[in-house]
Image: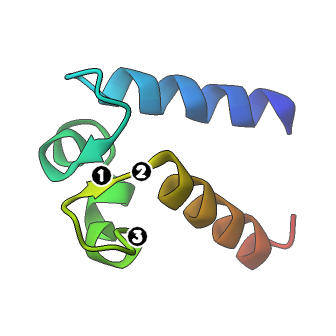
Amino acid sequence: MAQAKHDMQERLKAADTNGDGFIDRQEADAKLPRVAKNFDKLDADQDGKLSPSELKQASELARQRLGR
């Protein structure tokens, strides 16, 4: 589980090409297709970018759905 979390953090870091700490739609489209597909649902405050807390919440919901 710790390795999966680390791997996801690395993927998010790599996707954040402008280094601002957020994933915008273009970054998601380019590097994170599953995130891009659900971008509008994940963007809770509808500001056009996914914050670390929005990504964490999405990850927790995914784990719950998978029963982990």
CA gap, disc 1 to disc 2? 17 Å
Quadrant for residue 15, please give it: top left
For marks 3 and 1, give the CA distance: 13 Å
Decide if residue 32 is on the left or right side of residue 46. Answer: right
Q: Which mark is residue 33?
A: 1
SS at circle 3? helix
Marks 2 and 3: which is nearer the front? 2
User: Which mark sits nearer the N-terminus, 3 or 1?
Assistant: 1
Nearest to the observer: residue 13 or residue 51: 51
Provide residue 54's location: percent of width, then percent of height. Answer: 49, 60
Q: Amino acid at mark 3?
A: Leu
Q: Within 10 Å of the Cα at label 2, are there few (<14), some (14-19), or many (20+) other Cα atoms?
A: some
The label on residue 53 is none
When asked about the image quadrant of residue 62, the answer is bottom right
- Residue 28's x, y, as percent? 25, 46
The 10 Å Cα crowd at callout 1, few under 14, some 14 to 19, many 20 or more, is few
Give the CA separation, mark 2 to mark 3.
10 Å
What residue is drawn where x is 74% and y is 65%?
A: 63
**Label 2: which residue?**
51
Residue mark closest to the camera, 3 vs 1: 3
Q: Which residue is mark 3?
A: 42
Crowding near the residue tagged with mark 3, few <14, some 14–19, many ≥20 C-alpha atoms within 10 Å: many
Q: Residue drawn at (87%, 63%), measured in percent from left and top?
A: 68
The one nearer the camera, 67 or 21, is 21
